Image (cartoon, rainbow, N blue to C red):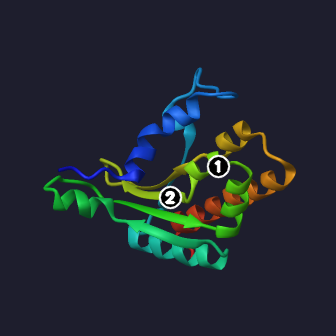
Amino acid sequence: MLKKSPLLALLAILPVLLFTGPGARAEGMSIADTVVKLPLEDGVSMDDAIESMKLRANALNFKLVAHQPLYKELEAMGLESKRVEIFQFCDARIAHTMISENLDFAAYLPCRITLIEDKNGQAWLVTLDLDQVIKMANLTPELLENATKVRDTIKEIMEAGASGDL
């Protein structure tokens, strides 16, 4: 029997969450418009990127709450896969504030950064474009400040990973 993954279920419905409901602007948007992608710089290995992201997240008080080496699971199933690893980061205090105000924010927790190798061997860091979520959310000034901090922190973690900056 196939076990359903909550993460895979969330990923499957993400386009629906972004492209439907009040304030959604699906017209003219593609799935690529909902993500931020950074290629790893020349000379930065995927392992270097991982180490850099972990160190930067720690320095910014964002906790690595989960790591899924998805490619290993796929290989265990007999499927050939390029490297795909999902990292989940969180600031529990900000998460608590956001979901206390609106339970819908729970669908976006924790923040994910995926390290993925494309078919040409280029490694990328990919995450949800939080600017798109922020635009739709109708946030109070406090929540906007928190959401902006999360967006900026995830961006900084990704930039450190892409550059291999320790």
- Give the mark count: 2
Snapshot quadrant of residue 114:
bottom left
Q: Which residue is mark 2?
A: 113
| Residue that protrudes farthest toward the right in the picture | 141
Question: What residue is rendered at 62% in x and 71% in y?
Answer: 62
Tag 1's secondary structure?
A: helix
Residue 43 visible in this rendered orientation of the protein? no
Q: Which residue is mark 1?
A: 103
Within 10 Å of disc 1 (Cα), the crowding (few <14, some 14-19, many 20+) is: few
Residue 60 coordinates in the image, percent (x, y): 67, 74
- Residue 163 position within the rendered picture, expressed as x and y whole percent measured from the top left: 54, 67
Q: Residue furthest top?
A: 27
Type of the residue with mark 1: Leu
Tell me if 126 is positioned left or right of 139 in this view.
left
Q: Name the amino acid, label 2.
A: Ile
Task: Locate residue 27 relative to residue 97 in the image: left or right.
Answer: left
Q: Is residue 157 above or below residue 34?
A: below
> Mark 2 Cα within 10 Å, few/some/many (few <14, many 20+)?
many
In this orientation, which residue lies closer to the viewer: 104 or 141?
Answer: 104
